[in-house]
Amino acid sequence: MSALHERLLAGFGSAFGGNPDFVVRAPGRVNLIGEHTDYNDGFALPVAIGVETRIAVRPRPDRLVRSVALDFDGEVDGFWIETPIRRAEGAGWRDYVRGSVDVLARRGFGHTGVDMAIAGDIPKGTGLSSSASLEVAVCHAMLAAAGHDDVPATEIALMAQEAENDFVGMRCGNLDQIASAATQAGAALLIDCRSLLLEAVTVPDGTAVMIVQSGVVRGLVEGHYNRRRAQCEEAAAALGVKALRDVDLAGLEDGRACMPEETFRRARHIVTENARTLDAAGALRAGDLASLGRLMAESHVSMRDDFGITVEHTDRLSAILAKAIGERGGARQTGGGFGGAVVAVMPVEIVERVREAVLNGYRTPDGGSPLIMIEQASAGAGLLTEAR
């Protein structure tokens, strides 16, 4: 039994007494390429990773939802399932739970009250989708408690996204929730964020995914994420298209005079990133890590120069990784931006050499060594076969 699972069961027993009836899990994710493309109806290529959120659940005979957050000093929340459910005092993790339950209730799911303990090992504020993982896990927990075990993964992901958009106030696209809900072990997931067509793209054997935390913790709701989305919508409107998915680089150049220069640059990142993502999926299918690496490098430059979401520390970290990896893979900032993590892809046999280069060449803002995670593509969310 993992340390996370032991902590979860102990926390449940301490808060509610006895044992849970079942446990659900939802993984974090790292996006190999395709940044900010999801809310532009574009393409993304994430993988689920080994860190995750777990929720121990016991249904109640009433409509009360009681939850304890073991990662936040055992903070508790309790509310009755009503429509609509109100935002919590102090917000934070509570609103991700409340928002998810609210969406389920309004969709006719999840009217059963529960006691649930929540724990995870996804680093917070680092671009690995701890919030999406929590939302997807809560949706699974509530659906299972109410006996709804046949809801498709994509529908669960969209309900989780709705909770973050409409309840929390973060206007994210659907990438993070789909990646947590619908990925397959051993494969990246090529997502067409408009049609919701999903393709599992096998990660070649012997390939490692390295995630290095820059130490710059970001907060997207308080930051510039919503502003970037508004600029993309402004560009699409100026071009007369539904979304930037519907324009190529030549068409964007033709419409350059119709928008402010900064808005044009934001749009150029999206248009070129969509093309890079499709090419990257092809490179991964072919086992061509050199081509994938070049595309990842181009993505980082585009995020830096056109979309304006990298920071000095992630620029430096990406450069260190790229130099150490050479032509055997690549690196780029991942996640919503303004800090967080850098992702790198490489053969397993050079992992230790690359790790040493990072530890020798990079320090976090507080002067410490960065957290380095070595991951493989993991399975999406679901019910654990054993609760205890």
Image: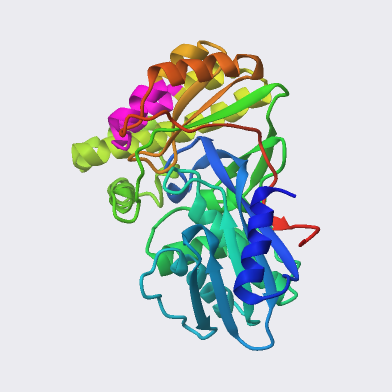
Chain part drawn in magenta: 297-318
In percent of width and height, residue 105 lies at 57, 79
Q: How many marks can you see?
A: 0
In the rendered image, the quadrant that contains the C terminus is bottom right
Above or below, 110 relative to 122: below
User: In the visual, does 37 lie left or right of 179?
Assistant: left
Q: Is residue 302 magenta?
A: yes
Q: Is residue 176 magenta?
A: no
User: In the visual, does 130 lie left or right of 364?
Assistant: right
Q: Residue at x 52, y 41 (%)?
A: 43
Farthest residue in the right direction?
Answer: 385
Q: Residue at x 35, y 32 (%)?
A: 303
User: In the visual, does 188 lie left or right of 275?
Assistant: right
Above or below, 349 relative to 338: above
Farthest residue in the bottom direction?
Answer: 62
Above or below, 183 relative to 288: below
Which sits in the foreground, 374 or 172?
374
In percent of width and height, residue 265 lies at 28, 35
Find residue 353 and report its image quarter. top right
Which sits in the foreground, 286 or 350?
350
Q: Which colour assignment does the render follow? A: rainbow
Which sits in the foreground, 354 or 75?
75
Which sits in the foreground, 43 or 113?
113
In percent of width and height, residue 386 lies at 80, 59
Q: Main secondary structure of the magenta part?
A: helix
Find residue 111 and report its image quarter. bottom right
In percent of width and height, residue 96 lies at 48, 65
Q: Is residue 174 visible?
A: no
